[in-house]
Structures are given as C-alpha cells and as structure tokens.
Image: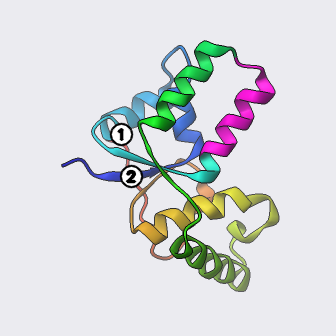
Amino acid sequence: MSAEVVVDTMIASAWLGVRGTARRARWEPLLVKSIWVLPFTVVAEMRFGAEVAGWGARRRGVLDRLVASSRVMPPLVVVTDAYVDLRTWCVRNGHGLGAKDHEADRWVAAVALAAELPLASEDAIFDSVPRLNRAVPS
C-alpha cells in the first residue's frame, strides 16, 4: 500500500510544467509511489494561477488530471479544528505562520496535522511547528 502525503502548492506545481525541474527530480522518488493529498487551498491556488496565466486546454488538462488523481481534502470539521489550534499556537508563540499573508499555508498545515500525514514542502514557514511531520525527498 502506498503512503499518503500532503503536497503543498510549491511541490505540486513542479508537476505542471512541460520540462522537468530540479524540485520535481528531488521529490519524484518519494511522490511517485505516494498517494497525494491536496488541501483544497492548493487546488484553488493552482487553478487561480492557471486562470491568471491564461493557460490553454492542454495545460489545464494536466492540472485537472493531477487533481483528479489526488485525494482533495476539504475544510472538514477536524481540519478546521486543527487550523484554529495551529493559528492560536502561532499567534501566541510569535511563529511566522500566524501572519496574515500565510492564510493558505495554515490550511495546508492544518490538513497535514488533522490527517496526521507528512507534508511535502520546501517552504521554511513550516519549520518548528509542533506535531507537523515533514516529508523528506528521497
């Protein structure tokens, strides 16, 4: 059975380009054998980016297939509770993830925390968050 991994926008978007990237090469050994869990905010960010960039049907198809092949996690009660706990901790402890401009990142972390799954991300904003298990590329 493949392990589930929560994948953030930075990592997921590496699978949308025509050419391979160093980021994709780093993460591919781990993620090719994993079940991707995409937080709803990641799907929204990627679809927004495609819309703003004016992607054509082919590139949108790549995005749609990526989303369809993943498990998309909505803001369930357990995720919302994890979000509240996380944001409260961040604000009380002065962690950067508590800042207004990290709203989507907090939801990504809340999904990983609620599901008790590792998070595939290279974003340092997730460093030092208690109970947040970070996936490590192979």
Query: Rounded to the nearest whole Å, what is the CA distance between mark 1 and mark 2?
Result: 8 Å
Left or right: 134 with respect to 124?
A: left
Above or below for 2 versus 104: above
Left or right: 9 with respect to 27?
A: right
Q: Are marks 1 and 2 in contact (CB under 8 Å)?
A: yes
Left or right: 64 with respect to 115?
A: right
Callout 1 crowding tier (Cα within 10 Å): few <14, some 14–19, many ≥20: many
Residue lying at 41% horizontally and 34% vertically, measured from the top left: 26
Closer to the chain start, of discs 1 and 2, is 2
Majority secondary structure of magenta residues: helix
Residue lying at 50% horizontally and 76% vertically, measured from the top left: 130
Above or below for 75 versus 56: below
Q: Find disc 2 in the rendering and name its residue.
A: 5
Above or below for 119 versus 77: above
Residue 69 forms part of the magenta stretch: no
Q: Find disc 1 in the rendering and name its residue.
A: 31
| Residue furthest bottom as drawn | 92
Instruction: Give whichever of 76, 34 is nearer the camera.
Output: 76
Badge 1 element: helix
x, y percent for residue 8: 55, 48
Callout 2 crowding tier (Cα within 10 Å): few <14, some 14–19, many ≥20: many
x, y percent for residue 56: 69, 14
Residue 52 forms part of the magenta stretch: yes
| Residue furthest left as drawn | 1
x, y percent for residue 122: 54, 47
As shown in the figure, which amino acid type bears the numbered disc 2?
Answer: Val
Residue 127 seen by the camera: no
Start and end of the magenta stretch? 43-55
Left or right: 28 with respect to 3?
A: right
As shown in the figure, which amino acid type bears the numbered disc 1?
Answer: Leu
